[in-house]
Structures are given as structure tokens and as C-alpha cells.
Amino acid sequence: MSNKKNEDLEMSGRDEKEFGERDTFLLQSAPSPRARADSGMGSTLSQLENKPGAAILAYCFSSISMTVVNKYVVSGSSWNLNFLYLAIQSVICTAAILVLKNMGFIPSLAALESGKVKKWLPVSVVFVGMIYTSTKSLQYLSVPVYTIFKNLTIVVIAYGEVLWFGGRVTPLLLLSFGSMVLSSIVAAWADIQAALNGAGHSVETAAAISTLHSGYAWMGLNVFCTASYVLGTRKFITSLHFKDWDTMFYNNMLSLPIMVVCSLVTEDWSSTNLANNFPVESRNNLMIGMLYSGLGAIFISYSSAWCIRKTSSTTYSFVGYLNKLPLAISGIVFFDAPVTFGSVSAILLGFFSGLVYGYGKMKQKEESKQVLPISQPSMSASSQSQKDASNS
């Protein structure tokens, strides 16, 4: 679901990546297509799988395509069925996980147990809030602006780790955080200026500004929900001994009834409204987009693990940061986002802040390795959680 679930599931693991994409588990058990292929096809897939460049391209494509597809689905002028859309995603993703499990691609999957369900339910509730606010943000904001503001989540998560997990913020990280905040301010200013200059009548201008304000409000809620989900996941994932596929499975299974109920209560299921949301001329494309968005979480899970296995966690982290630039450009290409000096400056500032953040995290990791082993070094709660998860 980024999926929105990619942004979501991208939130549950490593220090090097701002959203912590992909847990150590995926490095050990990512499904391999070679086991199911004949000798000729297996040889081709084996050669492809061993190419780091192919892994990087697959990860970039999966991340960019998911955001573009989600933007396409929710950007219709009459679209108002976000909960229904997310419920469809959950059904498709859950079905895909179960099929992969039955085919042997997923070695093990946590069964639904009442004790685990009770403990994980609050995380799933926050997960629903995260993916819903993500779709609402995309509905009102352009892809470049959405991408830039999404960086603010890194800042909130970092200081959440300082408060609750004993993390620390270095001067380089502080510089990157300042650049992220500045890029968001510039993006908002450029967006508002484009709305003011692009609308010819005062009524249209007021409507455009109101739309942007709604988008920023939803984006603020999304940053809060995303940070809460990441920090909550890190707290519970170790105690429940969840691996990445378990997290995906539980999130989809527990969030599905919540989204169905919310859709029935808050959304209009009348035939007229359904016809407005799924117009005949674009109905097939919307269905294909929904199908892809549901399967996209699986694609992102595999491509992320593939990228880490064939490169390194540092390379993977930098690819994630560098990916922000083509993602922002894709919004300009596919959705005709306004190209102004302010918008381009905001994109470049966001790109720069990502690079500084990645370099800062790399230096921080190197410094931690240089500590003399005179005594057992203290370990933050988040690092200990990751170590426990990898050993379980």
C-alpha cells in the first residue's frame, strides 16, 4: 500500500534507511525463482539475480511505480473511496502472501493467534492511519511535494529514537534534518505560488489554496502516523518474534476488517457514487492499478532483499535516498506537476538532504565500529531489538 504499504513496510528495519526498509529476515529467506524454473530459464534467472545493477533497478522501479500507481488511482476528480481502495489492496496482498506460502516461496508464516493479535492490533490501527493519510496526501498534493514532505518523517523518527531507544543525532544528521525542513518550506512556498499564479479567478485561487492546505494537513498527520508506526513496530516486532512476512501478513489481515468497517460507515457505496469513482472510460485501468498496488508490496519486499543481498546495506540506503530524485521527476512527467524555480530548488534540496543523511548514517556506523573492545559496549534499544530479531 505505499502499497502505501511499501512506505509502511519500508518502515520496519534497518538503521541505514530512514524508514528502515526490510528486515534481516529477508536476507535469509527472500523467495528465489530459481527453485521453480526449468534449467534454461533457471540459468537466465540465476545470471540476472547475480547482477547488482538489476537488483538496484528492480528496487527503484518497484518504489517509483507504487507511488505513481497510487497517485493515479486517487487523483480522479470524483474519487472518494480511499478506504475501499486500501481494503482491496489488503485482500490482494494477503492472497498473494498465502499463495507464495503454499508454493514454498515463504518458508514460514506466523499463524493468527489471539495473543499475538491482541498485541499487534494497536500497531495495525496505526498502520491503517498511516496508509489512509498517505492516500489522502497524494490525493491533494503533487508527487514531488509529497516526496519532499515525506522526508520530514525521518526527522520525527530520529528524535523518537533519541527519546525512547537511546539513539543520537550527529552534526551531519542535524545538517540533513535542517535541509529537509528547508526543502519542505521551499516546496510549500513554490506550490502556493504556482496555485496563486496559475488560477485566473479568485474563486479558483481560493479553491486551489484550500486544496493545498488540506494536503499539508493530511501530510502532517501522515508524518505523525508513520513515525508512530515505525517506533511501535520496533517495540513489538522483537517480543512477538515476527519476521518481515509475518508483519505484512498480520498488518493486512488485521487492517482489512478495520478498513471495510470504515468504508461502510464513512463512504458512499451507492451505485451513482461507484459509477463516479469508476467511470467507464478508465475503469479497467483503475482495476489494473489496484491489482498492481496490492501485489506491489510483495515486489518491493523481494526487490529490497535482493538489493541488500547483492550490494550492501550502505549501497541500499544510498539507493533509497537517490531514488527520491527520479520519484519527484516521475510526478512531473506523469502528472504534469508545475515546474518552477522553487519546485526544482525544493527537489534538489531534498535530494541533497538525503545524501547528507545517508553519509551521516554511514559515518555514525563507522565510528561505532572504532570503539575499542575494552568492555562490552552499550547498545541502544533499537539496535538490541534488531540483533535479537536477527538471532531469533
Image (cartoon, rainbow, N blue to C red):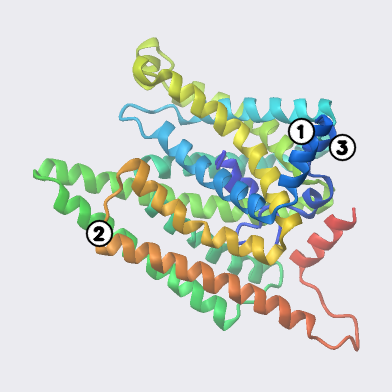
- Of badges 1 and 3, the one in the foreground is 1
Label 1, residues with CA under 10 Å away: few <14, some 14-19, many ≥20: few
Quadrant location of residue 108?
Answer: top right
Residue at left 81%, top 46%?
A: 242
Q: CA distance from mark 2 to mark 1?
A: 48 Å
Residue on which the image places disc 2: 340
- Evaluate whether residue 220 shows in this view: no
Q: Which mark is residue 107?
A: 3
The location of residue 295, given as percent across then percent down, is 62, 32
- Sequence order check: which comes first, mark 1 or mark 3? 1
Q: Can you name the residue that lies furthest to the top here?
A: 271
Residue 11 left/right relative to 148 = right
SS at mark 2 in the image: loop
Q: Amino acid at mark 1?
A: Met
The location of residue 281, given as percent across then percent down, is 34, 17
Q: Observer-nearest residue: 35 or 253?
A: 35
Q: Amino acid at mark 2?
A: Thr
